[in-house]
Amino acid sequence: MNDLGNNREQWGSRLGFILAAMGSAVGLGNIWRFSYVTGENGGAAFLLVYILCILLIGIPILMAEFTIGRRAQSDAVGAFEKLAPGKPWVAAGYMGVASAFIILSFYAVVAGWAVYYFVQYVLGNLSAPPEDGYAGFFVGFISNSTQPLFWQFLFMVLTVGIVFVGVKKGIEKANKILMPLLAILVIILAVYSLSLDGASEGVAFLFSPDWSKLLDPEVYLAALGQAFFSLSLGMGALITYGSYLKKEHKLPGAAVGVAGLDTIFAIIAGLMIFPAVFAFGVAPDEGAGLAFIILPEIFGDMALGQLYGILFFFLLSAAALSSAVSLLEVAVAFFIRKFDWSRKKASIIIGGIIFLLGIPASLGNGVWSHISFFGQPDIIDSMDFIASKIFLPLGGMIIALFIGWGWKKADALEHSDFGDTTLGNLWLFVLKFVAPVLIVIVFVAGLL
Ligand code: TRP
């Protein structure tokens, strides 16, 4: 039954689908990952390349994932098996399921930090600067061998709980309320941050490019990886979400809406973080702890800072949760169909495995800090590297080529809702040539 798509869930409405896709896109990627990657890659020049990646590669592939998902009414692997049986395109699906395991493993670790900070603000432990400063507090916490594991576990339990009851019941509602609240809060904090002494340096860092940075090929790979990560792209998360969509709902508007909101979110988060980075004298290339060090500095400086801290880390945790749900759903949907598991069984078993895989990621910040791969500084970065900079762009490239070359033109135009329009033809041209070529160039330049 599952194979035929008869038993599958459906979103309650087109809005529900768009909100779920937005909930998947907006998460730690926009605040935690965007800020430290932008800081490490020189600011404005990186931001420019990032936005180009969103426009030229991200949005077209996002549309491609939605189109494949809604057409196939199946998970990341099943979609390819159904639409092109026996063809090698399905490799993108398997790579996607693997990416879901890898990404969620470390994502839950970082989300656990956010939950921990929320609780610390509730308890009032961060109302005054800790003894060894906010940076010392952060490092002390993440390098601990047991404490972060507890919060990572808690976060995985919440994620499993939502996927367990089903994406529709689980997340359609929460996104409607919590995401707008997070947006409002980030705007308020950005306005505050911009009012700090020395804020203009942060604005310049974010918006006036140091063009020499464009000579560094790694900046392009970093921007490409960030675009895929932030849009939840390249591993079939949006194929899976698209598969819960009824045929009559239109796609292109949804794709632009999701990408637009996600990008605006990141830029405003940048305006929240970088003015404060310079105002408080923190190095922009501080690394993965940047947001967790700067935000407490901001709250420490504000009237009602504790309240803002509570709200912010609560909403950040919620945003991380709706993203984590989409990651877990990719694997769960695949196992439900492939092995005929129940949704409950699949969410618990896979969630458990992902928690275990995340333990080394957490310990890599402390006792296992000497272990890493691919020339990365630690285990989280190693996992993030292989997933975000290799698997996601590669998966995205296969998805683009699949629609561009593996589908009949008329089918692609019809099933994307573009029809035979200029925009539709432009979209196909990008999928056939522009996006794959750009991805190959960035790979060759950035990896060799
Ligand atoms: N986009 C999310 C964020 O920015 C993370 C995420 C959710 C993701 N689903 C994904 C990343 C699928 C890559 C692929 O936090």
Image: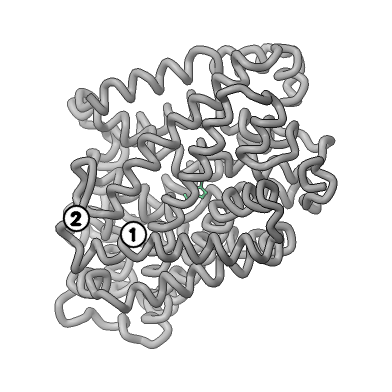
The x and y percentages for residue 11 are 77, 51
Tell me how many marks there are: 2
Q: Seen in the image, is 37 located left or right of residue 7?
A: left
Residue at x-position 69% and y-position 60%: 343
Amino acid under disc 1: Ser
Amino acid under disc 2: Ile
Q: Nearer the viewer, mark 2 or mark 1?
A: 2
Q: Seen in the image, is 379 located left or right of residue 232?
A: left
Q: Secondary structure at mark 1?
A: helix
Q: Is residue 201 visible?
A: no
Residue pointed to by mark 1: 193
Between the C-alphas of marks 2 and 1, the distance is 37 Å
User: In this picture, is 146 found above or below 44?
Assistant: below
Residue pointed to by mark 2: 371
Q: Seen in the image, is 109 located left or right of residue 65?
A: left
User: In this picture, is 50 found above or below 135?
Assistant: above
- Mark found first going from the N terminus, 2 or 1: 1
Specify whether tag 2 is near ligand 1 (CB below 8 Å): no
Q: Nearer the viewer, residue 39 or 89?
A: 89
